[in-house]
Image (cartoon, grey):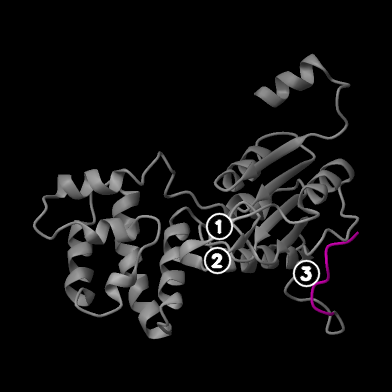
Amino acid sequence: AALAEARRLRPDAFSRVGYVGGSQGGWIAPLAASRSRVDYAVALYGLADGALAEDRGQVMDDLRAKGHGPDVLAKAREVTDATGGLMASGFTKGFDELDRVKAKYGDEPWFSDMEGEFTGAILRAPTWAPQWIVRAIAKRKDLGTSWDYEPMPVLEKLQAPQLWVLAEDDTEAPNAETRRRLRTLQEKGRPIDVVVFPHTNHGILEYAGKPADRISLRHPEGYLRLIADWITRGRLQGPYGSGKLQPAIAAPATAQTAEPASG
């Protein structure tokens, strides 16, 4: 509605218009673009996966960092499915499943290594605590997120060109699955550009230190210029520092690994 009103008030004020969303706005920008007449949608350090994927990805990264392998990750997926189901229901159902996985895995050494966005908080609730206490503890992590939102149906049909800029070492929104999904969409012909900045964390920020105590430093060289170029021109004219343009999955056999983003 705001975009339509802006066009009505100043129809000649701009040549290109679209939406830009960072983090959870990476769900909102494409969704808004699907409901408007726009020239582009930009998703910055967002996810092409559901909202529960943030917690799940963080838990898996926690466990990998502690040296746990695929067998443990498979078990942990049962746990995050349980905590995610509880969160998505608004703590109206799922306590029995949570009790089941806690009884099944609670004594295993890796169980206490899980943190994530909300899984750790739910698991640390004392076993004697009534459900309303568990709900009160974990609700602090629930800030109105649409936990059941699935972005792929929107992304698969969106006609407007998209730019996705991702942090390679994102600890808040791990994006390996997002990158896989976006490459699949590219392969299907969706107009999507994906640029990944190495050695950056959430917010496309360079950092110092280990994952547990990272200090954010600055945006990498070329990051803001990349966004400005793509929005104003509809294409990339790099290079943009260390940013790497990610190709589609089925790239030609002669193609090389992604080079710094260029037009």
Quadrant of the rendered image containing residue 126:
bottom left
Other residues around mark 2 within 10 Å, as few (<14) / some (14–19) / many (≥20) = few
Q: Which residues are magenta?
A: 256-263
In terms of sequence position, does the residue under pointer 2 or pointer 3 come before the other?
2
Q: Between residue 154 and residue 202, name the one nearer to us.
A: 202
With 192 as the anchor, is 68 left or right in this view? left
Q: Amino acid at mark 2?
A: Gly
Chief secondary structure of the magenta span? Answer: loop
Quadrant of the rendered image containing residue 193:
bottom right
* Residue 215: mark in rendering: 1
Measured Cα–Cα span from mark 3 to mark 1: 30 Å
- Residue drawn at x 45%, y 64% as measured from the top left: 58
Q: Is residue 48 in view?
A: no
Q: Residue 201: image x %, image y %? A: 60, 59
* Residue 209: mark in rendering: 2
Q: Which residue is mark 3?
A: 247
